[in-house]
Image: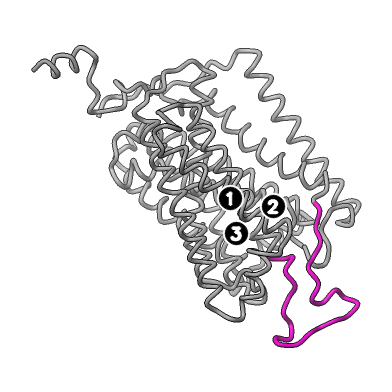
Amino acid sequence: MKFTDFREIEGRSLGYYALLALFGVLVLAGLYAGYYMETNGHHVTGMNNQIVWGIPHVFAVFMIVSASGVLNVASIASVFGRDMYKPLARLSGLLAISLLIGGLTVLVLDLGKPDRLIVAMTTYNFKSIFAWNIFLYTGFIAVVTVYLWTMMERRMNRYTKTAGMFAFIWRLTLTTGTGSIFGFLIAREAYDSALLAPMFIIMSFSFGLAIFILYTMAAYNLTGRPLGDAIMRRLKNLLGVFVAAVLYFVTVYHLTNLYMTAHHAFEKFILLNGGVYTALFWVGQVLIGGIVPLIILFHPRVNGGSRRMIAVAAALVLVGAFCQIYVIIIGGEAFPLIIFPGKIVSSSFFDGVVGHYRPSLPEITLGLSGVALAMGLATFAIKVLPYLPASLADADVDPHHKSKSEATEAAHA
């Protein structure tokens, strides 16, 4: 493997400072939105007694799941020994930490009483998956920080594989815990499935890699650094595999529910007559987030190796990802609780009625601020520390790369 020269970006342009300023404004707006909701109460949001996790939770889970998945690039390099991915490992770890911080910030500010986080951090009920996640989330940041240290400190390089293996196991456990938050909720027909844990793992691979591709392309385009076709081709093909795997798990999940009579009502709600949730599932999640990206990534006439089309596919994957988590969280809550199976229940407490939810501006602002915080942290970090290789040109990262003269000689030979 060739030596990789890691360098900080200069970050002296007006555009760079304008980008950081934009992220800063969005973060401040999110802080104000959190303060506004806390001081006025959740009646100023779209949430109610039926929908208690709103769109801030969608943003938070999206970023937490993506944080685990974006580290997959580093794991491929360290754990599975793929040399071409090693120059990307540092950026992979940085984005993992940044996305998790952004997601947890939104989660804390959406609690209604953020100061109660102290109770969650000091009093544990280990029968609750939420208590486990306190350790999983904070531990993930610590583990990835040590992992980055072993990569960036030359005398610690010999421990990189061990740290990478530990981080790999930890992030799989973390995503399993996140999926289990829903899988262990037996009172909700939409959840109550062991399939949610592995489905969240493969979702994290897809979402995280899509974010990594877009951020890498943006960083190298804006800084004028070389970005070769070889690495983009590998990332493109890997993203396609993950997108297909997500569609597979979604299919198995719904077929499993259809096999169980108790879940037929929920499946009919999501797949046929759920209104906005049905539309988000078929159009947003399956079509925009799955089928169309697969066509773009694998059909030679549509893609043709175009960087722009790869970026479009990654962006569509993220649109579908957001729709998928929205359907899982909001759609799962909107479907009425079955308190007395086989009985028709009617009361003044909306029993048996589909929940209504419309995201409010403060909620959306809070969610966007988490994304801005994550991207702002990563963008600032690549200026002060050497996370980015000076070049990702084919000649620098592809061990099988041949120059034009070598290729010509080989052809003549």
Q: Residue type at mark 3?
A: Ile
Residue 23 included in the magenta stretch of the image = no
Residue 345 included in the magenta stretch of the image = yes
Residue at the spot 58% in from the left edge and 61% down from the top edge: 133
Image mark for residue 107:
2
Q: Please, is residue 203 above or below residue 50 in the view? A: above
User: Pointers 3 and 1 in contact (CB under 8 A)?
Assistant: no
Q: In this view, does 29 lie to the left or right of 184?
A: right
**What element does badge 3 sit on?**
helix
Provide residue 119's location: percent of width, then percent of height: 71, 63
Provide residue 173's location: percent of width, then percent of height: 47, 60
Q: How crowded is mark 1: few (under 14 residues within 10 Å), some or many (20 or more)?
A: many
- Residue stretch in magenta: 332-358
**What element does badge 1 sit on?**
helix
Asked whether residue 18 is in view, the answer is yes
Figure quadrant of the N terminus: top left
Please tell me which of labels 2 and 1 falls first in the chain.
1
Residue at the spot 77% in from the left edge and 35% down from the top edge: 28
Q: Distance between the residues labelled 2 and 1?
A: 10 Å
Q: Is residue 222 left or right of residue 234?
A: right
Which residue bears the numbered disc 1?
Answer: 64
**What element does badge 2 sit on?**
helix
Q: In terms of secondary structure, what is the magenta stretch mainly?
A: loop
Please tell me which of labels 3 and 1 falls first in the chain.
1
Q: Nearer the viewer, residue 298 or 69?
A: 298
Q: Distance between the residues labelled 3 and 2?
A: 12 Å
Image mark for residue 134:
3
